[in-house]
Image: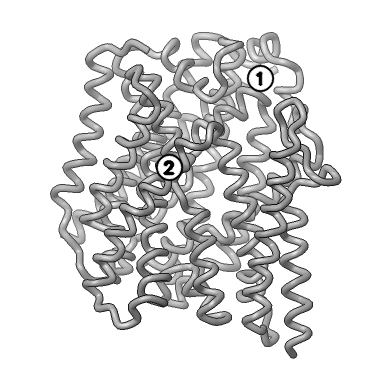
Amino acid sequence: MIDYAYLLIADAFLLAIGTVILAYFVIRDFLKQR
Amino acid sequence: MNLAPIDTGVIIVYLLILAAIGFFIKKRNTVSEYLLAGRRLTLPLFVVTLVSTWYGGLLGVGELSYNYGIVNWLTQGFFWYISYAFFAFFLAKKIRKSMLITLPDQLEKFYDKKSRLLGAFFNFIMVTPAPYILSIGIIVSLIFNWPVWIGVILGTLISILYTMKGGFMADVYTDFLQFILMCVGVAMIVPLAVMKYGGWTFLKTNLPASHLTLTGTWTTQMIIVWGFLAMWTLVDPGFYQRCYAAKNSKIPKKGILIAMGFWMLFDVCTTFIGMYARAAMPGIDPTTSFIVFANSLLPVFLKGLFLTGVIATIMSTIDSFTFVGATNLSHDIYKSAINKNASQKTEVRATRVGIVITGVFAMVLALFFKSIVAMWYTIGTIGISALLVPMMFGFFSKKKKHPLASFLSMIAGSLTSLFWLIWGYTHLWDGWPTYILNIEPMYPGLIMSLLTFIIINRMKK
């Protein structure tokens, strides 16, 4: 049986990746506006 | 708590960056620039400011998940997703298209000035950052062993400083930094907890069985009332403010849905951090369980990073709420009722004064209340009972609506729930309030508000 902990780690990983992607877009927009 | 110099250093660097943003940001003096960042919020900025502002109750969530387990996800997550989705699909576009500035503006558009003024009062209560200022006080006292009131004053002062000068734009830029810190802080602790303690079997062995069920030990009524509390979103001034500030009318809907994705991931992490804390360290204070658990789990530097993430999560809510409260005072009360001919410069100056008033009011409240969750509940119950019915009739009823119906429904809803709350808190049983007929205060509040609205509207036709 799959341990639910893997899903938990995947969730945290997605959160971190999502944060990096969004941060990239914020900085890109900021530089564009300058 | 004894922190290594490097951990304290991370926290100090974060606070210095906040102060630097306040120092270097351009001073803004027109109403649109100061209150809504010139309505130039792009989609990514919209998402970061909404995600970080909305998620301020980290200690409250820790308290609930430590005490009750997965039910925290149901009451603080799932119900809210329904509310966010409703807001995104049915309200967001309408709000942005109205080109207004605040939620009470919307009330005046639907009804009249009296509704606006009364709405501004309830709005102001709803956005008081008191629960979050109390959270900062608790954290600072835990980290540095200082009394709570020092943290309360420090947290308020710092957030006041940068919003006063740069207005909403300063708030948005600091939210960006705080968004990164809060997500990274929470995301990194989960795998470390799993690696140290193990997976599902560890939780199953060390937690009460009810922690791993969806409804835990809660009664159906308690769960449903939190479901109603999630309707807070529909009258949340922070949501409205960000919709008004968006660059175009498509951004709010998309932005809320993306933010919802982040909250979903975040809620799972926070719920399980609270549960790991309970399983690994039973008997600690639930309110500070996140911090005490992180202190025992994380190595040097990561500990500092996590604590900074927790502080950032809360600070982002304090500054935004203080700013919305100040806007209520300046735009909705001062400009609308006291000095109708106020110039843009005067209105901006009034907002700056409003920031100080809102901050001081919240500090006093924070020092008076002891529980973060109790404070949320009280504020939410009264605010929603007053505003929800007139706002939803305003948006969705095409029939003619009489302004008196809105005004009286706000009074009837809020007074009923306030009476119910006071009754409960003066009839404690085992430390818990017992309400009339065992009914939670929001139900009679909403029912009275709805009935008053319908009856007065009919009578006035």
Q: Check the picture and name the quadrant holding the C terminus of chain B.
A: bottom right
Q: Nearer the viewer, residue B67 or B350?
A: B350
Q: Amino acid at mark 1?
A: Ile
* Residue B302 in sight: no
Q: Nearer the viewer, residue B183 or B19?
A: B19
Q: Check the picture and name the quadrant holding the N terminus of chain B.
A: top left
Q: Is residue B202 above or below residue B121?
A: above
Q: Position of residue B186 (x, y in %)?
A: 44, 29
User: Disc 1: which chain?
Assistant: A
For the residues tagged 2 and 1, is the chain the same?
A: no
Q: Residue at x 54, y 23 (%)?
A: B273
Q: Is residue B7 above or below residue B159?
A: above
Q: Residue at x 73, y 41 (%)?
A: B424
Q: Residues within 10 Å of mark 1 (few under 14, many from 20)?
A: few
User: Disc 2: which chain?
Assistant: B
Judging from the image, what secondary structure is the residue with disc 1 in?
loop
Q: Residues within 10 Å of mark 2 (few under 14, many from 20)?
A: some
Q: Residue at x 46, y 76 (%)?
A: B97
- The numbered disc on residue B53 is none
Check the image and name the residue furthest to the front. Answer: B426
- The numbered disc on residue A2 is 1
In the displayed structure image, the side of residue B273 where residue B321 appears, left or right: left
Q: Residue at x 51, y 74 (%)?
A: B116
The answer to whether mark 2 and mark 1 are in CB contact below 8 A is no
Q: Determine which residue is flagged by label 2.
A: B364
Q: Amino acid at mark 2?
A: Val
Q: How many marks?
A: 2
Q: Position of residue B235 (x, y in %)?
A: 56, 61
Q: Position of residue B330 (x, y in %)?
A: 35, 67
In the displayed structure image, the side of residue B92 where residue B154 appears, left or right: left
Q: Position of residue B98 (x, y in %)?
A: 46, 77
Label 2 to label 1: alpha-carbon separation? 50 Å
